[in-house]
Amino acid sequence: MTAKILDGKSLAAEVRAGVKANVAGLASRGLRPGLAVLLAGDDPASKVYVRNKVRACEETGIRSERHEFPGDVSEKALLDKVAALNADPAVHGILVQLPLPAGVNSARILEAVSPRKDVDGFHAESMGALLSGAPGLVPCTPAGVMRLLEHAQVPLAGRRAVVVGRSNIVGKPLALLLLRKDATVTICHSKTRDLETIARQADILVAAIGRPKLVTAGMVKPGACVIDVGINRLADGSLAGDVDFAAVREVAGWITPVPGGVGPMTIAMLLENCLLAATK
Ligand code: NAD
């Protein structure tokens, strides 16, 4: 069997076109969604992520503003900026690019963002809504994974889903979203024993680990849907996911490539969250 490729690039382009049309519709009512991005320090990957997000906003007509701070920025300066953005009616979404510099308490900054403007879905109130099944802003990467699954009509209800990785930004919220769709969900992590056996039971296997090619063909049930969230930079400069794509695609029923799978969906979901925050 050769797996069907879940093409995040083309689905993300569709989502972006939809956002663009909606933004144009809002303009006729005098409303322009606005996103503010906070970036602190010199992390090169963060700079690339922020540039891509700002560019995606421009393409869809969402206004964006970037607020950059040096690596030695004080927590107070960031909190003051967040407070000003919370009060600014032209700003509908606030994104704090992680990681923040050492010495800044990231949780305190994220909790300062108004939940109404929490387009990353990292605020405790957003997390609580996700847990209880209430409507709210959902973290972008997990939302993007769910959209890919839905678009490909991968059956979820009653199926066994295994999420490898338990971070607050990917693994945990994704497990909750899969549960919402009636999957039977197992979360695995670095202390899980016999990962291979558990992974092989999965109808939907998600890798959100950050270890290149950790998921091998032997860990995949034939016909399963394999979602690779990982983005790993190899020594030769190339990108690899957490899944051994070449081998696993011969076993799986569906698979996401890296790049071109989950990554583009993350930004597309951010744009949708900005739209949602502006129109709520
Ligand atoms: P994280 O470091 O916060 O969490 C990694 C998780 O993997 C942890 O819960 C840990 O317990 C688990 N883990 C580590 N080693 C393991 C092992 N040997 N076996 C089983 N579990 C193990 O990472 P994160 O922020 O959740 O990101 C995970 C990956 O996804 C990274 O490669 C990151 O770059 C990528 N990512 C991609 C996107 C995207 O848009 N595609 C978005 C966010 C993160």
Image (cartoon, rainbow, N blue to C red):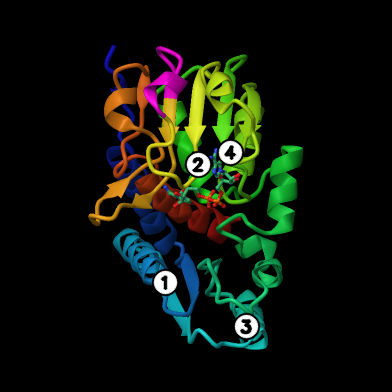
Q: Quadrant of residue 26?
A: bottom left
Q: Tell me the mark number nearer the camera, choosing from 2 and 3.
A: 2
Which one is closest to the eye, mark 4 or mark 1? 4
Task: Give the mark nearer the N terminus: 2 vs 4.
Answer: 4
Query: Given contact means CB atoms under 8 Å apart, are the residues at marks 2 and 4 in contact?
Result: yes
Quadrant of the drawing holding the C terminus: bottom right
For the point 57% across and 27% down, the residue is 195
| Amino acid identity at mark 1 | Ser
Indicate which disc, 3 or 4, sits on the residue closer to the N terminus.
Answer: 3
Q: Compare residues 236 and 248 and report the one nearer the observer.
A: 236
Residues in magenta? 216-225
Q: CA distance from mark 3 to mark 1?
A: 15 Å
Q: Position of residue 83 (x, y in %)?
A: 66, 80
The label number, if any, that marks residue 84 in the structure image = 3
- Within-10-Å neighbours for mark 2: few <14, some 14–19, many 20+: many
Residue, disc 1: 64
Q: Residue under circle 2? A: 208
Vertical position of residue 154 compared to residue 26: above or below: above
- Determine which of the numbered discs, if any, sits on residue 174 in the image: 4
The answer as to whether callout 2 falls within 8 Å of ligand 1 is yes
Say which label, 4 or 1, has the lower sequence index.
Answer: 1
Real-space Cα distance between discs 2 and 3? 34 Å
Of residues 225 and 216, the one nearer the viewer is: 216
Residue at x 37% of width, y 42% of height = 241
Viewer-nearest residue: 167 or 84 = 167
Is the residue at mark 4 in contact range of ligand 1, meaning its CB lies under 8 Å from it?
no
Mark 3 vs mark 4: in front: 4
